[in-house]
Image (cartoon, coloured by chain):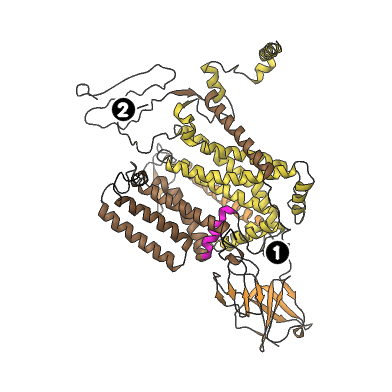
Amino acid sequence: MNDPMKSSDVPAKPGGPAGPALGRRDFLNEISAAALGITGLGSAVVSLNYISPNVLFEPPARFRVGVPDDYPVNSVSFLREQQIYIVRTAEGFTALSAICTHLGCITEWRPDDNLIACPCHGSKFNRDGVKVAGPAPRPLPHLSVQLAPDGQILVDKLATVPANQVLKV
Amino acid sequence: MSEKTPYTTGIDSDAERSPRRIVFVTKKTSGKVLGERSRQLMSFPHLVLREAMVLQGLIIVIALLSLFWDAPLEQLANPLLTPNPAKAPWYFLGLQELLHYFPPVVAGIILPGLVVVALVVIPYFEVNVKSEPFWAGGAPKKLKILGAILVVLLVVLAIFEAWTVLVPTVIMGGAMLLCKFMVPGTAKMWDYLRSKPLSWWVMTWFIAVSVTLTVVGTYFRGPGWSWVWPWR
Amino acid sequence: MSNSSAESLLERLRETKVWKSIFRRGPARTNRTRSVAVFGNLFLHFLPVKVREKSLRVRATYYLGSLTFFLFLILTVTGILLMFYYHPAVPQAYQDMKDLRFVVSNGLFLRNLHRIGAQAMVLFVFMHMFHVFYRGGYRAPRQFNWVIGVGLLLVTLFLSYTGYLLPWDQLAYWAITVGTNIISFMPWLGRITRFLLLGGRTVGENALLRFYVLHCVVLPLGAIFLVGIHFWRIQKDGGLELREENERKNSLHDGD
């Protein structure tokens, strides 16, 4: 009811279309609060910008993995350094991320079972990345595969593509 | 308090006791004053020296343990090679065991979040301030509600095949129900359990489940998070 | 003979102006000087001047809270000493861990102290919390102190978690990988939180440095801040909650 921050011993000024007029003290209080708020908000945004790194010391996300002839038809090749699988079917090439979608462990290709298996909690995927067993919540993401001008296969780990997209070779 | 005097008063000039409050309690009002009359001692030396002894005892124990129990150091971190099994520190192993049963959103975010929220609001739910035993009154209704909750909980746990959570829940729920039906005086344990309020039961169930999850995650899980017997 | 001459030497030392300018209250032999020893002291004035006799008993609290705090002090001291030989860089961190174990005098002992202290602190903070719960020490007017305690629990767990990465061995790397992946499951904020925490998309050099700063500076400061409030609140709430469990008294006449 009685706002202690508002001066109560000053008679109310005649009002205009927006309502009763503010006294000088109340106006200055509100301006200061707004200024502090803007400063605070600005500081938070600038700090967040600062803390978000612009340069990452990580292996490059786009890389070449050789020419199509390096990979036999109907094969699954595990590239350990880049943590991906290159899958070649009769149609063409797809690339799967080898990182299990459950909690980030690196999966392994089991040719005898025709499955990609994760050692941590027993998730299993087929060569399309679809989960067939275990607690993984999502299928293995398909990564963008393209043919570079020099004839090599170019993989981009940051670009995921739909599962039915195939690089036809 | 006698019938004649409608109030009691008193003062105390003993330096070892705090001054008593003077309270006027008439017949119409009820006094909820809890006078603390036990002896008071000077913090220095009594409290300060006891704390110093505790600190010294702690240092001795930790130092002795450190002479014989070496901290582990495995191979250099290799981002390309996941060890099998990859286990979290022991205080998170209960969580990792829970992750085996429920989707990561549930076991990793929702359940721990709910636990923290529940912990924070405990003191603000001023239910049962007097700590009445759970079975004190309204037994038939309580029996039905408790039975219903237990059945739903056990069915959900069975659907998710979360045996590690189910077994302690069965034990705690069983104890909660059994102590009602045991004849008073048969064994101290049942009388003790029957005197416990609901908050005690909930917290003890929580501790039982957490300890079971952590123990299983530590000793009973091997490669691929498969079940292993620790003595093999 | 030498005992009394040593004592009289101390007495004469205590009479000097220099001594009196530093230690102003004099020997704590009267109740007045004993009071000043507590409320006139920067490090002790969070304690009450007088305590109820019952609260000193071991069975009152088993000194669990005190033990947790003392473990924090031990971890701070051992942690600072460890910092003299540790570089938070990849792969230098791992090499430094090996140096501490094989090359540095008492390095293995120091690291053991720190690690055992850390495990013990997590254990004791849980035990303290459960004990306060079972004794009803969270009831009014101590509700907010309980909430501060939950905050301290989270700070302790996060301290332990950030410290776990620092050795940069397989155990550390994969434990943190699993943990940060769990964080990414948080709705909306999960991925950005993980990105900012790790300083990137994977656990790498940036992550090690950020966890080091969190572990050595940010979280300890947070802990000290909360511990200060926690102790101050105990005093302002009237000390320990000492009512026995089944004594819910509404009368004036409770016994001693």
Q: Please check whether the numbered discs 2 and 1 fall on a single chain.
A: no
Residue A141's image quarter? bottom right
Figure colour of chain C:
yellow
Residue linked to disc 1: B79
- Determine whether A35 is above or below A10 in the image: below
Does residue C187 appear anywhere in the picture? no
In the drawing, what numbered circle is on residue C253? 2
Q: Position of residue B14 (x, y in %)?
A: 41, 17
Q: Residue at x 76, y 45 (%)?
A: C85
Asked if residue A105 is among those painted magenta in the image, a careful observer would answer: no
Q: Chain of mark 1?
A: B
Figure colour of chain A:
orange
Q: Amino acid at mark 1?
A: Pro
Q: Amino acid at mark 2?
A: His
Q: Position of residue C43 (x, y in %)?
A: 59, 30
- Determine whether B119 is above or below C70 in the image: below
Q: Which residues are magenta?
A: B86-100
